[in-house]
Amino acid sequence: MRFDVIIIGGGFAGLAAGVALADAGKRVCLLEQKPYLGGRARSFQDPATSSVVDNGQHLFMGCYHSTIQFLKTIGTLDRVQFQTKLSVPFLDRDGRLTHLDCPDLPSPWHLFLGVLGSGSFTLKQKLEVLRLGKGLHNGGTTNGPANVESVTEWLTRRGQSEGLQRNFWNLLCIAAMNEDPRAASARLFERVLRLALFSSPEDSRLGIARVGLSECYTAAATAFIESRGGRVETGRGVNQLTVADGACRGVDLGGGERIEDVPVISAVPWHQFATMLPVDLARNEPFFAVGLALRPAPIISINLWFDAPITDLEFAGLRGTTIQWLFNRSRILGDKGHYVSLVLSGAREHVSRSKEELLAISLRELGGMLPAVRKAKLVHSLVMKERFATFSPSPEADALRPPARTPVHGLYLAGDWTATGLPATIEGAVQSGYTAAKEFLDLSR
Ligand SMILES: Cc1cc2nc3c(=O)[nH]c(=O)nc-3n(C[C@H](O)[C@H](O)[C@H](O)COP(=O)(O)OP(=O)(O)OC[C@H]3O[C@@H](n4cnc5c(N)ncnc54)[C@H](O)[C@@H]3O)c2cc1C
Protein backbone atom coordinates (compact mmCIF):
# COMPACT_ATOMS: atom_id res chain seq x y z
CA MET A 1 0.00 0.00 0.00
CA ARG A 2 1.23 3.51 -0.76
CA PHE A 3 1.24 6.07 2.07
CA ASP A 4 1.48 9.89 2.06
CA VAL A 5 3.46 10.13 5.30
CA ILE A 6 5.27 7.97 7.83
CA ILE A 7 4.94 8.85 11.51
CA ILE A 8 7.47 7.30 13.89
CA GLY A 9 6.20 6.89 17.45
CA GLY A 10 2.80 5.99 18.89
CA GLY A 11 2.56 8.28 21.92
CA PHE A 12 0.27 11.31 22.21
CA ALA A 13 2.40 13.32 19.73
CA GLY A 14 2.51 10.69 16.98
CA LEU A 15 -1.15 9.73 17.31
CA ALA A 16 -2.27 13.38 17.36
CA ALA A 17 -0.25 14.05 14.19
CA GLY A 18 -1.69 10.90 12.62
CA VAL A 19 -5.28 11.85 13.47
CA ALA A 20 -4.82 15.42 12.16
CA LEU A 21 -3.35 14.16 8.89
CA ALA A 22 -5.93 11.38 8.45
CA ASP A 23 -8.59 14.03 9.05
CA ALA A 24 -7.02 16.08 6.25
CA GLY A 25 -7.33 13.11 3.87
CA LYS A 26 -3.76 11.80 4.09
CA ARG A 27 -2.94 8.10 4.23
CA VAL A 28 -0.80 7.71 7.33
CA CYS A 29 1.58 4.89 8.20
CA LEU A 30 2.40 5.07 11.94
CA LEU A 31 5.24 2.86 13.21
CA GLU A 32 5.69 2.11 16.91
CA GLN A 33 8.63 0.04 18.09
CA LYS A 34 6.96 -1.33 21.24
CA PRO A 35 4.29 -4.02 21.08
CA TYR A 36 1.83 -1.42 22.44
CA LEU A 37 0.95 2.23 21.82
CA GLY A 38 0.96 5.06 24.37
CA GLY A 39 4.66 5.72 24.98
CA ARG A 40 5.13 7.55 28.25
CA ALA A 41 1.36 7.84 28.83
CA ARG A 42 0.14 4.28 28.84
CA SER A 43 -1.59 1.71 31.07
CA PHE A 44 -1.44 -2.03 31.58
CA GLN A 45 -3.10 -4.68 33.68
CA ASP A 46 -1.13 -5.64 36.76
CA PRO A 47 -0.96 -9.47 36.68
CA ALA A 48 -0.97 -9.86 40.47
CA THR A 49 -4.09 -7.78 41.18
CA SER A 50 -5.73 -7.33 37.74
CA SER A 51 -5.85 -3.58 38.48
CA VAL A 52 -5.35 -1.16 35.61
CA VAL A 53 -2.05 0.58 36.33
CA ASP A 54 -0.81 3.70 34.54
CA ASN A 55 2.92 4.01 33.95
CA GLY A 56 2.49 7.01 36.27
CA GLN A 57 -0.67 8.86 37.27
CA HIS A 58 -1.31 11.71 34.82
CA LEU A 59 -3.32 14.86 35.45
CA PHE A 60 -5.02 16.79 32.64
CA MET A 61 -6.00 20.46 32.91
CA GLY A 62 -8.76 22.59 31.45
CA CYS A 63 -6.07 24.59 29.64
CA TYR A 64 -5.13 21.47 27.62
CA HIS A 65 -7.10 22.84 24.66
CA SER A 66 -5.34 20.78 21.96
CA THR A 67 -5.68 17.59 24.00
CA ILE A 68 -9.38 18.23 24.57
CA GLN A 69 -9.77 18.80 20.83
CA PHE A 70 -7.86 15.57 20.07
CA LEU A 71 -9.97 13.48 22.47
CA LYS A 72 -13.15 15.07 21.07
CA THR A 73 -12.09 14.21 17.52
CA ILE A 74 -11.50 10.55 18.36
CA GLY A 75 -14.61 10.41 20.57
CA THR A 76 -13.10 9.70 24.00
CA LEU A 77 -13.29 13.04 25.83
CA ASP A 78 -15.86 11.55 28.24
CA ARG A 79 -13.16 9.21 29.58
CA VAL A 80 -11.45 12.14 31.26
CA GLN A 81 -13.45 13.78 34.02
CA PHE A 82 -12.79 17.46 34.62
CA GLN A 83 -13.62 19.18 37.90
CA THR A 84 -16.38 21.80 37.76
CA LYS A 85 -13.91 24.22 39.40
CA LEU A 86 -10.34 23.94 40.67
CA SER A 87 -10.27 22.13 43.99
CA VAL A 88 -7.11 20.68 45.52
CA PRO A 89 -6.89 18.95 48.91
CA PHE A 90 -3.53 19.17 50.69
CA LEU A 91 -2.37 16.72 53.34
CA ASP A 92 0.43 17.83 55.64
CA ARG A 93 2.96 15.32 56.94
CA ASP A 94 1.15 15.23 60.32
CA GLY A 95 -2.18 14.45 58.63
CA ARG A 96 -3.69 17.98 58.70
CA LEU A 97 -6.09 18.29 55.75
CA THR A 98 -6.75 21.63 54.05
CA HIS A 99 -8.28 22.62 50.73
CA LEU A 100 -7.78 25.13 47.97
CA ASP A 101 -11.27 25.57 46.50
CA CYS A 102 -11.63 28.19 43.80
CA PRO A 103 -15.12 29.65 43.31
CA ASP A 104 -16.63 30.04 39.86
CA LEU A 105 -15.64 33.68 39.31
CA PRO A 106 -13.77 35.36 36.46
CA SER A 107 -9.97 35.08 36.59
CA PRO A 108 -8.04 36.07 38.64
CA TRP A 109 -10.77 36.37 41.30
CA HIS A 110 -11.43 32.62 41.30
CA LEU A 111 -7.85 32.05 42.46
CA PHE A 112 -7.61 35.06 44.76
CA LEU A 113 -10.79 34.17 46.66
CA GLY A 114 -9.80 30.48 46.66
CA VAL A 115 -6.48 31.34 48.31
CA LEU A 116 -8.06 33.83 50.76
CA GLY A 117 -10.61 31.24 51.94
CA SER A 118 -8.14 28.36 52.17
CA GLY A 119 -6.71 26.94 55.38
CA SER A 120 -3.63 25.86 53.39
CA PHE A 121 -1.93 29.24 53.87
CA THR A 122 -1.13 31.67 56.69
CA LEU A 123 -2.42 35.23 56.30
CA LYS A 124 1.09 36.40 55.37
CA GLN A 125 1.35 33.67 52.70
CA LYS A 126 -2.07 34.59 51.30
CA LEU A 127 -0.90 38.17 50.83
CA GLU A 128 2.27 36.92 49.14
CA VAL A 129 0.26 34.79 46.68
CA LEU A 130 -2.04 37.74 45.94
CA ARG A 131 0.94 39.99 45.27
CA LEU A 132 2.48 37.55 42.80
CA GLY A 133 -0.91 36.85 41.23
CA LYS A 134 -1.60 40.55 40.74
CA GLY A 135 1.76 40.96 39.00
CA LEU A 136 1.07 37.98 36.75
CA HIS A 137 -2.44 39.12 35.95
CA ASN A 138 -1.19 42.59 35.01
CA GLY A 139 1.32 40.90 32.73
CA GLY A 140 4.53 42.34 34.11
CA THR A 141 6.59 40.13 36.37
CA THR A 142 9.52 38.99 34.23
CA ASN A 143 11.30 42.31 34.29
CA GLY A 144 14.31 40.54 35.78
CA PRO A 145 16.80 38.10 34.27
CA ALA A 146 13.97 35.61 33.73
CA ASN A 147 15.64 33.92 30.76
CA VAL A 148 18.33 32.50 32.99
CA GLU A 149 16.52 32.58 36.29
CA SER A 150 15.42 29.47 38.17
CA VAL A 151 11.93 29.21 39.67
CA THR A 152 13.37 29.56 43.17
CA GLU A 153 15.30 32.71 42.24
CA TRP A 154 12.23 34.20 40.57
CA LEU A 155 9.85 33.39 43.44
CA THR A 156 12.31 34.80 45.97
CA ARG A 157 12.71 37.96 43.89
CA ARG A 158 8.91 38.25 43.80
CA GLY A 159 8.74 38.20 47.60
CA GLN A 160 7.51 34.63 48.08
CA SER A 161 8.68 33.34 51.46
CA GLU A 162 10.59 30.09 51.87
CA GLY A 163 7.65 28.42 53.67
CA LEU A 164 5.19 29.34 50.89
CA GLN A 165 7.62 28.12 48.24
CA ARG A 166 8.11 24.81 50.06
CA ASN A 167 4.42 24.17 50.75
CA PHE A 168 2.81 25.48 47.59
CA TRP A 169 4.82 26.82 44.67
CA ASN A 170 7.39 24.02 44.73
CA LEU A 171 4.65 21.39 44.68
CA LEU A 172 3.07 23.09 41.63
CA CYS A 173 6.42 23.53 39.92
CA ILE A 174 7.48 19.91 40.35
CA ALA A 175 4.04 18.64 39.30
CA ALA A 176 3.84 20.82 36.19
CA MET A 177 7.49 20.83 35.13
CA ASN A 178 8.96 17.65 36.68
CA GLU A 179 11.99 19.52 37.95
CA ASP A 180 13.37 20.85 41.20
CA PRO A 181 12.44 24.57 41.35
CA ARG A 182 16.13 25.39 41.93
CA ALA A 183 16.88 23.97 38.47
CA ALA A 184 13.65 24.76 36.58
CA SER A 185 13.16 27.69 34.21
CA ALA A 186 11.32 30.67 35.72
CA ARG A 187 10.17 31.77 32.29
CA LEU A 188 8.47 28.45 31.57
CA PHE A 189 6.93 28.30 35.05
CA GLU A 190 5.53 31.78 34.68
CA ARG A 191 3.95 30.75 31.39
CA VAL A 192 2.45 27.65 33.02
CA LEU A 193 0.99 29.77 35.84
CA ARG A 194 -0.53 32.20 33.37
CA LEU A 195 -2.09 29.43 31.29
CA ALA A 196 -3.20 27.21 34.15
CA LEU A 197 -4.11 29.58 36.98
CA PHE A 198 -4.62 33.07 35.60
CA SER A 199 -6.42 32.49 32.34
CA SER A 200 -9.95 31.40 33.25
CA PRO A 201 -11.64 29.23 35.91
CA GLU A 202 -12.34 26.61 33.20
CA ASP A 203 -8.66 26.41 32.27
CA SER A 204 -7.67 25.92 35.93
CA ARG A 205 -9.75 22.76 36.42
CA LEU A 206 -7.97 19.44 36.83
CA GLY A 207 -8.97 16.38 34.82
CA ILE A 208 -8.42 12.73 35.70
CA ALA A 209 -8.86 9.77 33.34
CA ARG A 210 -11.58 7.41 34.61
CA VAL A 211 -10.05 4.53 32.65
CA GLY A 212 -6.46 3.40 32.09
CA LEU A 213 -4.46 6.01 30.18
CA SER A 214 -4.08 3.86 27.07
CA GLU A 215 -7.84 3.37 26.93
CA CYS A 216 -8.24 7.15 26.70
CA TYR A 217 -6.76 7.40 23.26
CA THR A 218 -4.68 4.64 21.69
CA ALA A 219 -7.38 2.34 20.24
CA ALA A 220 -9.69 5.22 19.28
CA ALA A 221 -6.89 7.12 17.52
CA THR A 222 -5.85 3.94 15.69
CA ALA A 223 -9.45 3.35 14.54
CA PHE A 224 -9.66 6.97 13.35
CA ILE A 225 -6.46 6.69 11.30
CA GLU A 226 -7.23 3.25 9.88
CA SER A 227 -10.81 4.12 8.92
CA ARG A 228 -9.32 6.83 6.68
CA GLY A 229 -6.99 4.56 4.76
CA GLY A 230 -4.01 4.62 7.12
CA ARG A 231 -2.25 1.95 9.14
CA VAL A 232 -0.90 1.81 12.69
CA GLU A 233 1.73 -0.86 13.29
CA THR A 234 3.16 -1.83 16.67
CA GLY A 235 6.36 -3.85 17.12
CA ARG A 236 7.82 -1.98 14.12
CA GLY A 237 10.87 0.06 15.12
CA VAL A 238 12.70 2.37 12.77
CA ASN A 239 16.45 1.78 12.70
CA GLN A 240 17.43 4.82 10.72
CA LEU A 241 16.07 7.69 8.69
CA THR A 242 17.08 7.49 5.05
CA VAL A 243 18.57 10.86 4.15
CA ALA A 244 20.23 11.75 0.86
CA ASP A 245 21.01 15.11 -0.77
CA GLY A 246 19.48 17.06 2.11
CA ALA A 247 16.14 15.27 1.88
CA CYS A 248 14.52 12.51 3.94
CA ARG A 249 13.58 9.67 1.59
CA GLY A 250 11.91 7.29 4.05
CA VAL A 251 12.97 4.88 6.77
CA ASP A 252 15.15 1.82 7.24
CA LEU A 253 13.46 -0.80 9.44
CA GLY A 254 16.45 -3.14 9.60
CA GLY A 255 16.78 -6.63 8.12
CA GLY A 256 16.89 -5.09 4.64
CA GLU A 257 13.39 -3.67 4.97
CA ARG A 258 12.81 -0.07 3.91
CA ILE A 259 9.90 2.23 3.20
CA GLU A 260 10.99 4.58 0.43
CA ASP A 261 9.99 7.92 -1.06
CA VAL A 262 7.68 8.95 1.77
CA PRO A 263 8.11 12.03 3.99
CA VAL A 264 8.57 11.41 7.70
CA ILE A 265 7.33 12.91 10.96
CA SER A 266 9.45 11.79 13.89
CA ALA A 267 7.42 11.75 17.12
CA VAL A 268 9.94 10.03 19.36
CA PRO A 269 11.78 11.52 22.37
CA TRP A 270 15.03 13.41 21.75
CA HIS A 271 17.37 10.64 22.96
CA GLN A 272 15.66 8.08 20.71
CA PHE A 273 15.65 10.47 17.76
CA ALA A 274 19.44 10.63 18.09
CA THR A 275 19.74 6.89 17.37
CA MET A 276 17.78 7.19 14.10
CA LEU A 277 19.80 10.07 12.66
CA PRO A 278 22.51 9.20 10.13
CA VAL A 279 25.89 9.80 11.83
CA ASP A 280 27.07 12.59 9.52
CA LEU A 281 23.86 14.54 10.09
CA ALA A 282 24.06 14.10 13.86
CA ARG A 283 27.67 15.32 13.81
CA ASN A 284 27.52 18.10 11.25
CA GLU A 285 24.09 19.68 11.39
CA PRO A 286 23.89 22.12 14.35
CA PHE A 287 20.08 22.09 14.20
CA PHE A 288 20.05 18.51 15.45
CA ALA A 289 23.02 18.79 17.81
CA VAL A 290 21.19 21.43 19.82
CA GLY A 291 18.04 19.46 20.62
CA LEU A 292 19.98 16.36 21.49
CA ALA A 293 21.73 18.20 24.33
CA LEU A 294 18.57 18.10 26.49
CA ARG A 295 18.84 16.29 29.84
CA PRO A 296 16.30 13.81 31.23
CA ALA A 297 14.30 14.15 34.45
CA PRO A 298 12.85 11.07 36.19
CA ILE A 299 9.49 10.33 37.83
CA ILE A 300 8.88 7.56 40.37
CA SER A 301 5.45 5.99 40.95
CA ILE A 302 4.74 3.84 43.97
CA ASN A 303 1.62 1.72 43.66
CA LEU A 304 0.21 0.22 46.85
CA TRP A 305 -2.62 -2.24 47.38
CA PHE A 306 -4.06 -2.53 50.93
CA ASP A 307 -6.59 -4.93 52.42
CA ALA A 308 -8.75 -2.08 53.78
CA PRO A 309 -9.62 1.53 52.87
CA ILE A 310 -6.94 4.06 53.83
CA THR A 311 -8.59 7.33 52.68
CA ASP A 312 -11.78 8.72 51.17
CA LEU A 313 -9.87 11.40 49.28
CA GLU A 314 -9.71 10.97 45.52
CA PHE A 315 -6.33 12.68 45.39
CA ALA A 316 -4.22 15.05 47.47
CA GLY A 317 -1.09 17.15 47.25
CA LEU A 318 1.27 16.06 50.03
CA ARG A 319 3.20 18.73 51.93
CA GLY A 320 6.46 18.29 53.78
CA THR A 321 7.05 14.74 52.54
CA THR A 322 9.27 13.06 49.94
CA ILE A 323 6.23 11.72 48.10
CA GLN A 324 4.27 14.57 46.52
CA TRP A 325 0.86 13.37 45.35
CA LEU A 326 -1.54 10.66 46.41
CA PHE A 327 -4.11 9.23 43.97
CA ASN A 328 -6.82 6.89 45.16
CA ARG A 329 -6.85 4.68 42.08
CA SER A 330 -9.68 2.44 43.25
CA ARG A 331 -11.92 5.47 43.71
CA ILE A 332 -10.81 7.01 40.41
CA LEU A 333 -11.45 3.82 38.45
CA GLY A 334 -14.54 2.88 40.46
CA ASP A 335 -13.31 -0.56 41.55
CA LYS A 336 -13.85 -2.20 44.92
CA GLY A 337 -10.19 -2.48 45.92
CA HIS A 338 -7.95 -0.31 48.06
CA TYR A 339 -5.32 0.67 45.54
CA VAL A 340 -3.45 3.99 45.73
CA SER A 341 -0.69 5.44 43.60
CA LEU A 342 1.93 7.85 44.94
CA VAL A 343 3.94 10.17 42.73
CA LEU A 344 7.46 11.47 43.22
CA SER A 345 8.33 13.83 40.37
CA GLY A 346 11.58 15.70 39.75
CA ALA A 347 13.04 12.57 41.33
CA ARG A 348 16.70 12.87 40.33
CA GLU A 349 18.02 12.52 43.87
CA HIS A 350 15.77 9.55 44.64
CA VAL A 351 15.96 7.51 41.45
CA SER A 352 19.05 5.57 42.53
CA ARG A 353 17.35 4.44 45.76
CA SER A 354 16.30 0.78 45.77
CA LYS A 355 12.63 -0.04 45.28
CA GLU A 356 12.55 -1.44 48.83
CA GLU A 357 13.86 1.85 50.20
CA LEU A 358 11.31 3.87 48.22
CA LEU A 359 8.55 1.59 49.46
CA ALA A 360 9.68 1.99 53.07
CA ILE A 361 9.81 5.81 52.77
CA SER A 362 6.32 5.90 51.23
CA LEU A 363 4.76 3.65 53.85
CA ARG A 364 6.35 5.62 56.67
CA GLU A 365 5.22 8.98 55.28
CA LEU A 366 1.75 7.75 54.35
CA GLY A 367 1.32 6.21 57.81
CA GLY A 368 2.18 9.59 59.37
CA MET A 369 -0.56 11.28 57.35
CA LEU A 370 -3.28 8.62 57.32
CA PRO A 371 -3.72 6.58 60.52
CA ALA A 372 -5.66 3.89 58.58
CA VAL A 373 -2.43 2.97 56.79
CA ARG A 374 -0.93 1.81 60.08
CA LYS A 375 -3.81 -0.63 60.64
CA ALA A 376 -4.22 -1.84 57.04
CA LYS A 377 -2.13 -4.65 55.60
CA LEU A 378 -0.13 -4.01 52.44
CA VAL A 379 -1.01 -6.87 50.11
CA HIS A 380 0.92 -5.85 46.99
CA SER A 381 3.21 -3.09 45.73
CA LEU A 382 4.73 -1.99 42.47
CA VAL A 383 7.45 0.68 42.31
CA MET A 384 8.10 2.09 38.84
CA LYS A 385 10.94 4.38 37.84
CA GLU A 386 10.64 6.33 34.57
CA ARG A 387 14.21 7.59 34.23
CA PHE A 388 13.50 9.43 30.97
CA ALA A 389 10.05 10.66 32.01
CA THR A 390 10.57 14.15 30.57
CA PHE A 391 13.34 16.50 29.52
CA SER A 392 14.60 18.76 32.28
CA PRO A 393 13.08 22.25 31.72
CA SER A 394 16.16 24.16 32.84
CA PRO A 395 16.55 27.84 31.88
CA GLU A 396 18.97 26.70 29.13
CA ALA A 397 16.61 24.05 27.69
CA ASP A 398 14.29 26.53 25.95
CA ALA A 399 16.91 27.52 23.41
CA LEU A 400 17.72 23.84 22.71
CA ARG A 401 14.21 22.79 21.67
CA PRO A 402 13.86 22.54 17.89
CA PRO A 403 10.84 23.58 15.80
CA ALA A 404 8.76 21.09 13.77
CA ARG A 405 10.33 22.07 10.45
CA THR A 406 13.90 20.79 10.05
CA PRO A 407 16.63 21.72 7.54
CA VAL A 408 16.13 18.28 5.98
CA HIS A 409 13.43 18.40 3.34
CA GLY A 410 10.63 15.90 4.10
CA LEU A 411 11.56 15.49 7.78
CA TYR A 412 9.41 17.01 10.54
CA LEU A 413 9.69 16.79 14.31
CA ALA A 414 7.02 16.27 16.94
CA GLY A 415 7.18 15.25 20.59
CA ASP A 416 6.83 16.98 23.95
CA TRP A 417 10.51 18.04 23.80
CA THR A 418 10.17 20.17 20.65
CA ALA A 419 9.64 23.95 20.80
CA THR A 420 6.07 24.03 22.10
CA GLY A 421 6.62 26.70 24.76
CA LEU A 422 5.23 24.22 27.29
CA PRO A 423 6.87 21.76 29.68
CA ALA A 424 6.88 18.06 28.71
CA THR A 425 3.18 17.34 29.06
CA ILE A 426 0.37 15.61 27.22
CA GLU A 427 -0.70 19.03 25.98
CA GLY A 428 2.79 19.80 24.68
CA ALA A 429 2.91 16.42 22.93
CA VAL A 430 -0.50 16.84 21.26
CA GLN A 431 0.26 20.44 20.26
CA SER A 432 3.57 19.32 18.75
CA GLY A 433 1.79 16.62 16.74
CA TYR A 434 -0.70 19.17 15.41
CA THR A 435 2.10 21.61 14.56
CA ALA A 436 4.11 18.98 12.67
CA ALA A 437 0.97 17.91 10.78
CA LYS A 438 0.28 21.53 9.82
CA GLU A 439 3.86 22.10 8.66
CA PHE A 440 3.63 18.94 6.57
CA LEU A 441 0.33 20.02 5.00
CA ASP A 442 1.59 23.57 4.35
CA LEU A 443 4.75 22.35 2.64
CA SER A 444 3.15 19.56 0.63
CA ARG A 445 0.40 21.70 -0.86
C1 LIG B 1 5.40 8.94 35.05
C2 LIG B 1 4.97 10.10 34.19
C3 LIG B 1 4.00 10.99 34.68
C4 LIG B 1 3.60 12.06 33.89
N1 LIG B 1 2.61 12.89 34.35
C5 LIG B 1 2.06 13.81 33.52
C6 LIG B 1 0.91 14.55 33.90
O1 LIG B 1 0.40 14.40 35.02
N2 LIG B 1 0.38 15.41 32.99
C7 LIG B 1 0.92 15.60 31.76
O2 LIG B 1 0.36 16.37 30.97
N3 LIG B 1 2.04 14.93 31.37
C8 LIG B 1 2.62 14.04 32.21
N4 LIG B 1 3.70 13.32 31.82
C9 LIG B 1 4.36 13.63 30.53
C10 LIG B 1 3.64 12.97 29.35
O3 LIG B 1 3.43 11.60 29.59
C11 LIG B 1 4.53 13.10 28.12
O4 LIG B 1 4.85 14.46 27.94
C12 LIG B 1 3.85 12.60 26.83
O5 LIG B 1 3.25 11.35 27.03
C13 LIG B 1 4.91 12.51 25.72
O6 LIG B 1 4.33 12.04 24.54
P1 LIG B 1 5.20 11.91 23.21
O7 LIG B 1 4.27 11.35 22.19
O8 LIG B 1 5.89 13.18 22.95
O9 LIG B 1 6.35 10.85 23.54
P2 LIG B 1 6.25 9.32 23.95
O10 LIG B 1 5.01 9.08 24.76
O11 LIG B 1 7.55 8.95 24.55
O12 LIG B 1 6.06 8.55 22.57
C14 LIG B 1 7.14 8.25 21.72
C15 LIG B 1 6.95 6.86 21.16
O13 LIG B 1 7.96 6.65 20.16
C16 LIG B 1 8.35 5.30 20.23
N5 LIG B 1 9.65 5.15 19.56
C17 LIG B 1 10.86 5.58 20.00
N6 LIG B 1 11.83 5.27 19.11
C18 LIG B 1 11.22 4.63 18.08
C19 LIG B 1 11.69 4.06 16.86
N7 LIG B 1 12.97 4.09 16.54
N8 LIG B 1 10.78 3.49 16.04
C20 LIG B 1 9.46 3.44 16.34
N9 LIG B 1 8.97 3.95 17.50
C21 LIG B 1 9.83 4.55 18.35
C22 LIG B 1 8.37 5.02 21.71
O14 LIG B 1 8.35 3.61 21.98
C23 LIG B 1 7.13 5.76 22.20
O15 LIG B 1 5.99 4.93 22.19
C24 LIG B 1 4.17 12.27 32.60
C25 LIG B 1 5.15 11.39 32.14
C26 LIG B 1 5.55 10.32 32.91
C27 LIG B 1 6.58 9.36 32.38
Image (cartoon, helix red, strand yellow):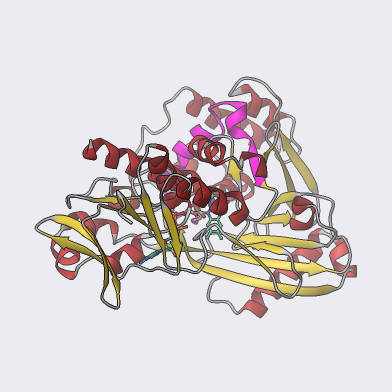
The boundaries of the magenta stretch are 179-208
Asked whether, in this view, residue 374 is left or right of residue 39, the answer is right
Asked whether, in this view, residue 223 is left or right of residue 330, the answer is left
Q: Quadrant of residue 310?
A: bottom right
Q: Nearer the viewer, residue 130 or 59?
A: 59
- Residue 242 x %, y %: 20, 64
Residue 251 lies in the magenta stretch: no
In this view, 126 is above or below 377:
above
Q: Residue furthest left?
A: 245
Report the quarter where the N terminus lies. Answer: bottom left
Q: Quadrant of residue 89?
A: top right
* Residue drawn at x 39%, y 52% as measured from the top left: 415
Q: Nearer the viewer, residue 29 or 412?
A: 29
In this view, 137 is above or below 340:
above
- Residue 75 x %, y %: 59, 40
Report the quarter where the C terminus lies. Answer: top left
- Residue 393 x %, y %: 41, 52
- Residue 138 x %, y %: 47, 22
Q: Nearer the viewer, residue 380 or 249?
A: 249
Asked whether, in this view, residue 43 is left or right of residue 150, the answer is right
Q: Nearer the viewer, residue 431 or 146?
A: 431
Q: Is residue 189 visible?
A: yes
* Residue drawn at x 40%, y 56% as measured from the top left: 30
